[in-house]
Amino acid sequence: RAFIDYFDITPAAYRKLLRPIPLYTRRNINHQHIGIGVDSIMDEKFMNDVKVAFVKKPERKMLVWYSEGATDYHELCDAEGAEEIWGILESMKGTLGGPIAAWLNENGKSRYVWGVEMPMDYMGQIPEGLECVVAKECDYVKFCHPPYAEELHESVTEAVWNVSEIWSPKDNGWELIDSDNPVYEDDRIEEGYMVLKPVRKM
């Protein structure tokens, strides 16, 4: 009865229809990426733990949400409706890996978004507040720090971003194409914190 009162759907119907519902599960937002600057502390230990790998993403649909003026995860968490949207994203089935956070580049402007990626043949419901965009097939270079203690979050994220900035695509036979494809960040318990940047072979 509590489930019906809260989500306006029976548990049995939800299991059958897999309709997105606002679970209100929220990630920790007490940390904010500092970025690279004159005062950044280059912690060699954390940077040495960052691994570089390559992955390919297929052409896909992205169901995304953003808030005007929010440029990173911390700011988007503070936007109106953020908790409900993240819960809806986590409840969606058939995604290509669960909720994502990314910067979309459109006509020279960048938008920071949350969303989910779906196969191109996805024809299901698009929850209210989300929009659908198509992302091209693309290679990505992934910078990933393995799982870490929560109190190390700031050091880990800074190390990952530092390594991603120091790594030279051209020196490794690639070129960065972030003007056409999303840049991702993710933080998964089983894999760690990562940044993915789109590249193509030179």
Image (cartoon, rainbow, N blue to C red):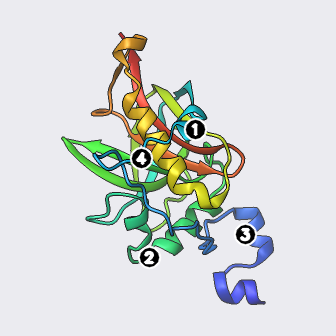
Tell me the number on the disc at residue 14. Answer: 3
Q: Name which of mark 3 and mark 2 comes first in the sequence.
A: 3
- Amino acid type, residue under disc 4 in the picture: Ile
The crowd level at tag 2 (other Cα within 10 Å; few <14, some 14-19, many 20+) is: few
Q: Describe residue 157's horizontal placement relative to residue 129 as left or right.
A: right
Measured along the vertical axis of the image, is residue 61 above or below residue 68? above
Is residue 116 among what the camera can see? no
Dot 2: what SS?
loop
Dot 3: what SS?
helix
Measured along the vertical axis of the image, is residue 119 above or below residue 4? above
Residue labelled with disc 1: 45
Residue labelled with disc 2: 81
Q: How much space separates mark 2 and mark 1, taking CA atoms?
A: 38 Å
- Amino acid type, residue under disc 2 in the picture: Gly
Q: Describe residue 4's horizontal placement relative to residue 105 as left or right.
A: right
- Amino acid type, residue under disc 1 in the picture: Lys
The quadrant in which residue 121 appears is top right
Q: How much space separates mark 2 and mark 4, taking CA atoms?
A: 35 Å
- Pointer 2 with pointer 4, Cβ within 8 A: no
Q: Residue at x 33, y 66 (%)?
A: 67
Dot 4: what SS?
loop
Tell me the number on the disc at residue 41. Answer: 4
